[in-house]
Amino acid sequence: MPGVHVKAASTAGKRRTAAIGPARRIADELRAQNERFAAAVENMSHGLCMFDADERMIICNRNYIDLFRLDAKVVKPGIRYFDILQHSVDIGIAGQSAEELHAIRKPYIDGARPSTYEEVLSDGRIIVISHRPIAVGGW
């Protein structure tokens, strides 16, 4: 009798496994793809960041954080673009106010067309910024 019970449980488990098999396989493939994407972003030689239509950060890589000498505890997904500008003022990397910096960049944000410009940081470094809008809004 115990053998029958074990066999019945085993069969039920196989049915459950078969039912969740495709879902698990898709989830595993998605996880692997996300890991490859994250590795590619982190291994880029350039700083990269992406913002949504509400000017909130979606993603950035370590080179972006390092390039602008930002604090990774402050600058992370979900932060508003204006708050990043304010952070750059607070740490002394920007020579203008966050309001002035945002006003300078707003035409690039609203223009929805690719552009490239240079930014002179307070430490004298000149950073070339490539602005590339995305179809769903943001850049």
Image (cartoon, rainbow, N blue to C red):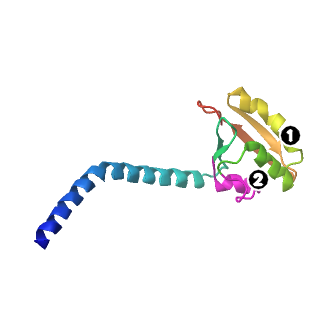
Look at the image and give the residue range highlighted in magenta: 59-76
Q: CA–CA distance between discs 2 and 1?
A: 18 Å
In the rendered view of the protein, which quadrant contains the C terminus? top right
Position of residue 112 measured from the top left corner of the image (x, y, whole percent): 68, 28
Q: Residue at x 84, y 56 (%)?
A: 91
Q: Which residue is the extreme one toward the front?
A: 1
Locate residue 115 relative to residue 59 in the image: left or right. right
Between 38 and 15, the one lying in front of the other is 15
Between 71 and 64, the one lying in front of the other is 71
Residue 129 belongs to the span the image colors magenta? no
Q: Nearer the viewer, mark 2 or mark 1?
A: 1
Q: Which residue is mark 1?
A: 99
Q: Amino acid at mark 1?
A: Glu
The secondary structure type at the circle numbered 2 is loop
Locate residue 27 relative to residue 80 in the image: left or right. left
- Among the 4 quarters of the image, the one containing residue 132: top right
Residue 74 belongs to the span the image colors magenta? yes
Q: Which residue is mark 2?
A: 68
Please report whichever mark, 2 or 1, sits nearer to the chain's N-terminal start. Answer: 2
Query: Which circle marks residue 28 in the picture?
Result: none
Position of residue 117 measured from the top left corner of the image (x, y, whole percent): 77, 37
Q: Amino acid at mark 2?
A: Phe
In the rendered view of the protein, which quadrant contains the N terminus? bottom left
Q: Residue at x 12, y 71 (%)?
A: 3
- Residue 102 to residue 63: above or below: above
Between 110 and 47, the one lying in front of the other is 110
Locate residue 57 relative to residue 3 in the image: left or right. right
